[in-house]
Amino acid sequence: MGDRQEESVVSEGQPKICVGGIEIGEAEREYVGRVLDTGRLSYGPFMREFEQRFAEMQGAAHGVMSNSGTSALQLALHALKEIHGWSDGDEVVVPAVTFVATSNIVIHNQMKPVFVDVEREYYELDPALLEGKITTRTRAIIPVHLFGLPCEMDPIRDVAARYDLKVIEDSCETMFARYRGEPVGSMGDIGCFSTYIAHLLVTGVGGLNTTSNYDYMVKIRSLLNHGRDPSYLSIDDDDDVSDQELQDIVARRFRFNSVGYSYRATELEAALGLAQLEKIEVAIQQRAANAARITDGLRDLEDRIQLPRIRPGCDHAFMMYPIVLRDEEKSRVVNGLEKRGVETRDMLPLLNQPVYQRLFQIDVDDYPVADWVNGNGFYVGCHQYLAPQDIDYLLEVLHEVISD
């Protein structure tokens, strides 16, 4: 989510441990070639299959692909706001640690983000603080499954049910993980995923919505096509129909029911996604193995760093490997890692961003755990493309830098 692709300054010949990676295999090349051979780049059979297979894997009835995870979030909230008649200025609860897109889309929908501090152990929305943020204008909660780990969803859903609130799962960083047996993206009203660079499933650009509500699916698909009348959202929609149905489609296919967007993806991204789905289980297993090896290798530093934990009853997909320093100076550590070829990223600081300070005048002292994560947290890669010697080097450098 929000991955940057700048190159670090490293010595010639020095290993480079990136936060993510991609290898284009035979299946990716074959599927993309088949798309090019057809000459069909707009929404078609590859995307329909990708949407359906992905939705099924995430425990939902419907999937809709768009051009980014941010677009998926924007579409989800817009669809709910329009269908349920919410007003500008109504409130949406979001965690105080997340990528800026989670709360930006609330602002773009002319609604108000209300922030909740996060759990110290898992860095996700703290359910114990949630009910205190609910007002008469609250309409939805956006729990964020960060770093590959599902949120504590049961108490969040309990609060949502008690106050008649909708739940949008921001799962842009987490796929193929379960919370007490339930897949992420299936526990709320709408799930949102990203297939951007360095994510768990990479299509270059791309996002996905999952839902088991047919009306939500139709509205999302319409909104990503400029708000077009759902009778005609694909060039296939007028195939094999009766004369009367064709006349109706022709009359309506340039009718727009909402102020929508151009958030469409192409068959090329869907082809890459389908190819990667075929090997996703191996990828997730390798990420888990890499993360376990890193954790074992850093146990001797636990008095100086907080290592990631797996929530009881949950899987962890380990999109990345988060670390929070206890007392060390963060800038010294991350700069030392970068100089040695280990890429780092901040653990998604939000409330201290200049634009948020300007818009909301937030006192970060009101969010002590988020403030601690912002000041002390970063992550490194643990993806499936790392070789054993890469993990050895990563552990060596982490020890050197943290122990300096």
Image (tube, helix red, strand yellow):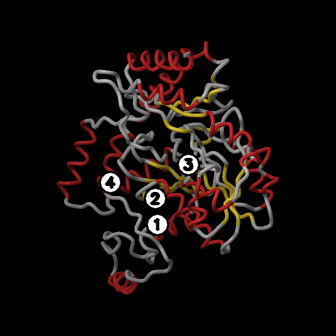
User: Could you tell me how far apart the alpha carbons at marks 4 and 2 are, in whole angstroms?
Assistant: 12 Å
Q: Residues within 10 Å of mark 3 (few under 14, many from 20)?
A: many
Where is residue 258 shown, x and y percent of the image?
A: 50, 78
The secondary element bearing badge 2 is classed as: strand
Residue tagged 2:
64
Identity of the amino acid at label 3? Phe
The secondary element bearing badge 1 is classed as: helix
Mark 2 / mark 3, whichever is N-terminal: 2
Residue 99 marker: 3
Mark 1 / mark 4, whichever is N-terminal: 4
Foreground label between 4 and 3: 3
Foreground label between 1 and 4: 1
Residue tagged 4:
46
Identity of the amino acid at label 1? Arg
Where is residue 261 shown, x and y percent of the image?
A: 44, 70
The residue drawn where x is 51% and y is 30% is 334
Residue 385 marker: none
User: Could you tell me how far apart the alpha carbons at marks 4 and 3 are, in whole angstroms?
Assistant: 30 Å
Where is residue 38 shown, x and y percent of the image?
A: 19, 58
